[in-house]
């Protein structure tokens, strides 16, 4: 009887293994169809995901406004603090978008188009200034000449106007907003975000209930701890980086305007935007700004601009940014550079931005695991010594 049971178990094992192999084969055999089905499914739920993301981003201002309303002396406001905070948050977000679209975006777009249209003229002026330099100038070396000639050939071979013009920019904006381009999608996105903000307590309670049903109490508490820590890191990092980008963009724009740099708003906007990406963003933005200023305003103006911007970047890195972010991440610069490099290589700009909080969360998990293993080893050693 025992032998029969062993044979049955053996055949059952190989039968299930064969089914698993067939299922894997059929999955890859119909991979295109399956990927299309998955893709269509994500297209359908895209407004819900976008709404959840929007609610996540608006949670910080909504919660801060709600705390202010809760302290209000008016009973009507206290009882409806959450609803009023969500309403006010959306009003402020809409006003911010209106200002961006009607004030800042047209200036930036106009500057980009003007720069592209006049780029060849700026380049010719730059080459002429280079040719008028004294023969004993350090910039008149053969290597510099080769670089300038190579850049000139590249510029002449690229028709920037076919990539950057009012029609193309309009297309780019539409493609960026394509996730929620339809009226229905926009409506669903806003409704979902509103409900998530209003019902966030019930949603979290439901998630905690699922966790308690699946895991034991200790594991569930640990998951909750990681979830709270991850949220704090992401909220703090995303909100602070956006605020810091706005402050840096405004300061740089004002400084460039005072210096007389052409396209000050465009360059300030770009430096502020790139400043969201730790380390690399600031370096890339400043390098591009220096090159554009050399072409449009000459070497001396570019040097002054570079010195001023670097000073502002140092003020931001040592005073403004730490005040906004604090020490919430507590990770080494080397780890940040590694995270940004890997994130950018695999997931582009978004990966460069999100890689830092993700690596901070992973650091917490890994440290906890290492501490757990070390504690266990110490326990085993103490047991052995007692024996």
Image: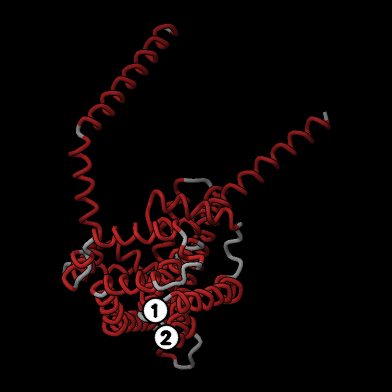
Viewed as shown, does residue 387 lie left or right of 14?
right
Q: What element carries label 1?
A: helix
**Residue 218 horizontal/vertical position (percent):** 57, 49
Q: In which quarter of the image is the N terminus?
A: top left
Check the image and name the residue furthest to the right.
Answer: 386
| Residue 9: quadrant of the picture | top left
Q: Nearer the viewer, mark 1 or mark 2?
A: 1
Counting residues from the N terminus, which is met first, the one under dot 1 or under dot 2? 2
**Residue 205 horizontal/vertical position (percent):** 44, 61
Foreground: 13 or 114? 114
Instruction: Check whether the beta carbons of the residues at disc 1 and disc 2 lie within 8 A of each other.
Output: yes
Looking at the image, is 33 positioned above or below residue 18?
Answer: below
Q: Residue 297 carries which label?
A: 1
**Residue 109 horizontal/vertical position (percent):** 27, 76
Looking at the image, is 223 positioned above or below residue 286?
Answer: above
Label 2 environment density (alpha carbons within 10 Å; few <14, some 14–19, many ≥20): few
Measure how far apart labels 1 and 2 are at the Cα level. 9 Å
Q: Residue 260 carries which label?
A: 2
Viewed as shown, does residue 243 lie left or right of 323?
left
Q: Quadrant of the C terminus?
A: top right
């Amino acid at each position: 009887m025992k032998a029969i049971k062993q044979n049955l178990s053996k055949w059952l094992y190989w039968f299930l293994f064969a089914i698993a192999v067939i299922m894997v084969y059929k999955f890859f055999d119909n991979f295109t169809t399956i990927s299309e089905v998955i893709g269509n499914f994500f297209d359908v739920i895209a407004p819900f995901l976008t709404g959840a993301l929007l609610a996540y981003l608006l949670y910080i201002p909504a919660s801060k406004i709600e705390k202010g309303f809760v302290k209000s002396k008016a009973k009507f406001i206290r009882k409806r603090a959450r609803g009023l905070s969500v309403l006010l948050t959306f009003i402020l977000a809409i006003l911010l978008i209106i200002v961006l679209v009607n004030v800042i975006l047209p200036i930036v777009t106009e500057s980009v188009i003007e720069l592209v249209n006049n780029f060849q003229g700026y380049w010719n002026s730059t080459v002429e200034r280079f040719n008028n330099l004294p023969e004993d100038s350090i910039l008149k070396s053969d290597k510099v000449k080769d670089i300038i000639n190579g850049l000139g050939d590249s510029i002449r071979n690229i028709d920037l106007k076919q990539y950057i013009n009012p029609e193309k920019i309009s297309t780019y904006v539409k493609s960026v907003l394509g996730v929620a381009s339809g009226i229905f999608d926009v409506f669903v996105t806003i409704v979902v975000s509103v409900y998530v903000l209003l019902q966030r307590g019930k949603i979290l309670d439901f998630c905690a209930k699922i966790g308690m049903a699946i895991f034991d109490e200790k594991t569930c508490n640990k998951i909750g701890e990681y979830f709270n820590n991850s949220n704090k890191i992401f909220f703090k990092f995303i909100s602070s980086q956006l605020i810091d980008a706005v402050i840096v963009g405004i300061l740089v724009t004002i400084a460039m305007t005072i210096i007389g740099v052409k396209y000050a708003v465009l360059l300030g906007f770009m430096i502020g935007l790139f400043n969201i990406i730790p380390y690399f963003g600031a370096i890339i933005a400043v390098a591009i700004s220096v090159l554009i200023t050399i072409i449009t305003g000459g070497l001396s103006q570019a040097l002054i601009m570079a010195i001023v911007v670097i000073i502002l970047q140092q003020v931001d890195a040592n005073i403004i940014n730490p005040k906004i972010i604090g020490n919430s991440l507590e990770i080494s610069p080397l780890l940040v550079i590694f995270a940004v490099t890997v994130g950018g290589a695999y997931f582009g700009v978004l990966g460069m931005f999100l890689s830092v909080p993700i690596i901070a969360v992973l650091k917490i998990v890994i440290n906890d695991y290492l501490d757990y293993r070390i504690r266990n080893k110490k326990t085993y050693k103490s047991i052995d010594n007692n024996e």
